[in-house]
Image (tube, rainbow, N blue to C red):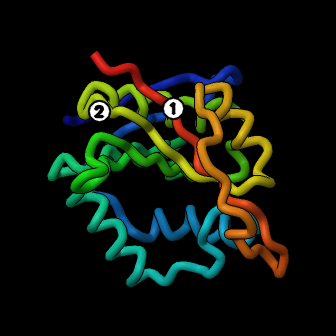
Amino acid sequence: MAYKRIISLDEGTQVTIEQLTGKEDAKDFQHLINPIIKEGAFILRDMPVPLAEEKKWLSERIDANRNGKEIFLKAIIEGSLIGCCNATQGRFMERGNVDLGIMLDKKWRGKGIGKLLLEESIKLSKKKWKPKNIYLMVVSENKEAIKLYTFLGFRVKAVLPDRINRKGRYYDLLIMTQNQKRK
């Protein structure tokens, strides 16, 4: 399934949303994640990602896309990778569910790109896998993300108390789900 869509933001900026092509450069993904880690964003990663690790990760994402186990969308503005979102089908007895993950460059947050990435990932997941539930995890202090996820129909299903250690302080990890109606 090759997916590509070009969207104009309110101020006229063109955003290309597309699936992995297999021609991506791991350096682009490393240049996306490492500043997000450095800013102390509420992602589970807290140490910079070395290029060798990023290459392995990207290769796994490309394979998962080719094998139909994952839908990975990337957001590109003026040739630069500014965000990505992946929807991964559960394995074995969890295969009726989908897990989501998203990351977006700080400069582009609050402009609707994250919402767009999530909506498109959800739509493609529903079409491809017809999941019972779509899950995501979020740190309890990430209020803007929780607001977006709630707007998209996600509800807190579980709380893992004091799960995330960020700079010596512990935060709860929320598991949110968007239930799907079975036919």
The answer to whether residue 56 of the structure is visible from this angle is: yes
118 on left or right of 163? left
- Amino acid type at circle 1 is Gln
Q: Which mark is residue 101?
A: none
| Element type where label 2 sits in the image | loop
Q: Are marks 1 and 2 in contact (CB under 8 Å)?
A: no
Kindly identify which residue carries mark 1.
178
- Amino acid type at circle 2 is Tyr
Quadrant of res 24: bottom left
Of marks 1 and 2, the one in the foreground: 1
Kindly identify which residue carries mark 2.
3
Could you say which is closer to the camera, residue 76 or residue 170? 170
| Element type where label 1 sits in the image | strand
- In the rendered view, tell whether residue 95 sits above or below residue 164: above
* Residue drawn at 50 percent across, 70 percent down: 30
Position of residue 55 measured from the top left corner of the image (x, y, whole percent): 35, 75
* Residue drawn at 67 percent across, 31 percent down: 150
Position of residue 124 measured from the top left corner of the image (x, y, whole percent): 33, 30
Position of residue 36 measured from the top left corner of the image (x, y, whole percent): 66, 64
- In the rendered view, tell whether residue 102 sits above or below residue 9: below
Tell me if mark 2 has few (under 14), some (14-19) or many (20+) residues whose alpha carbon lies within 10 angstroms of its own. Answer: some
Could you say which is closer to the camera, residue 134 or residue 88? 134
63 on left or right of 81? left
- First of labels 1, 2 by sequence position: 2
* Residue drawn at 38 percent across, 84 percent down: 52
Instruction: Give the CA separation, mark 1 to mark 2.
Output: 23 Å
